[in-house]
Image: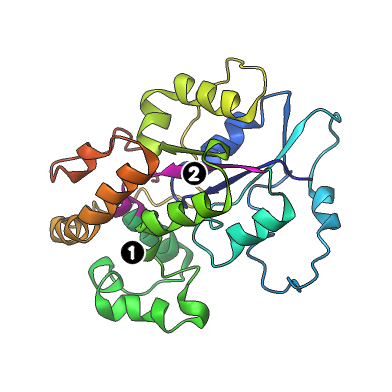
Amino acid sequence: MIDFFGVGTQKGGTTALFNALSKHPGLCLAERKELHLFDDERIDWRDPDLSGALDEFPPHSEEALLGDITPIYAYWPNALERIARYNPDARLIFLLRHPAYRAYSHWKMETKRGNEKLDFETAISQEGRQRVAASLGGVSRVYSYVERGFYPAQIRRMLSLFPRHRVLIRTTDRLWTQPEQVLQEIQKFLGVEVRSLASPSYVVPVDTSSAPPMPAHCRKALDALYADPILESAKLSGLDLARWLDPDYEEPMLPEGS
């Protein structure tokens, strides 16, 4: 059975987390990041056969904890509920990135992949967001730049399905500014021996370093939209997110390709 899950957020450092945790001898990560098991709508979820999921893991000791890092799980409808039915004792790791920066990084990736033709301002406007609302189930894997940044609903779902001690929420900021401390906290949370793991390096599946910075007026609009959700996210998670409300806030990591 898969023991723990990295459930979000997309563009929040989950690839770096996957690479770092893969070095721990007491953990066994799937051979590929993002199994996309619990968001797979082709599965008959009335009576799912998930036994094949274990084929995705390399040989490991019986004591090793198995982990799946698929950052769409927190956002995708019913994914968390499916995880809870599959393993009610699972542990969930949720990395939060400043939602405006997350949205822009997501848009850059989809633009580079050729999935997005709209400019960022239009993509995050009511016109652009209508594509999400009009999608099946009101969710979109591609165009959900704004929607995925509404963290409170995702956190509330997690806490309604899992005990608080089985959910660990941290910020992407701290993963870069205090990598050793955050990785130690994650190891303690998972209940494995705390080891010194290599500091995570920022890894992106698509290099978008050629894109210009986020337009200032778009950042201002997103900051206004996300102000209340940031406050609520702080209350639900217990994290200090006050700096995210500063209009002059800049991410502590500005890696190439982010």
**Disc assigned to residue 146:** 1
Residue 146 appearing in the image: yes
Q: Residue at x 81, y 59 (%)?
A: 50
Quadrant where the N terminus sits is top right
* Image colouring: rainbow
Tell me the distance, in whole angstroms, between the alpha carbons under discs 1 and 2.
18 Å
Task: Specify whether residue 94 is painted magenta.
Answer: yes
Does residue 78 sit above or below 214 in this rendering? below
Which is more toward the observer, 52 or 58? 52
Side (left or right) of 88 relative to 248? right
Residue in the image at 31% along x and 43% along y: 234
Q: Which mark is residue 203?
A: none
Residue 65 occupies which quadrant of the picture? top right
Q: Position of residue 150 (x, y in %)?
A: 35, 59
Q: Secondary structure at mark 2?
A: strand
- Graded by Cα atoms within 10 Å as few (under 14), some (14 to 19) or many (20 or more), the crowding at tag 1 reads many
Q: Which mark is residue 94?
A: 2
**In the image, what residue occupies the spot 61% across and 60% down?**
81
Q: Does the magenta run of residues contain 58?
A: no
Please tell me which residue lies in front, 164 or 212: 164
Q: Which residues are magenta?
A: 90-102
In front of the other: 211 or 33: 33
Q: Position of residue 240 (x, y in %)?
A: 28, 35
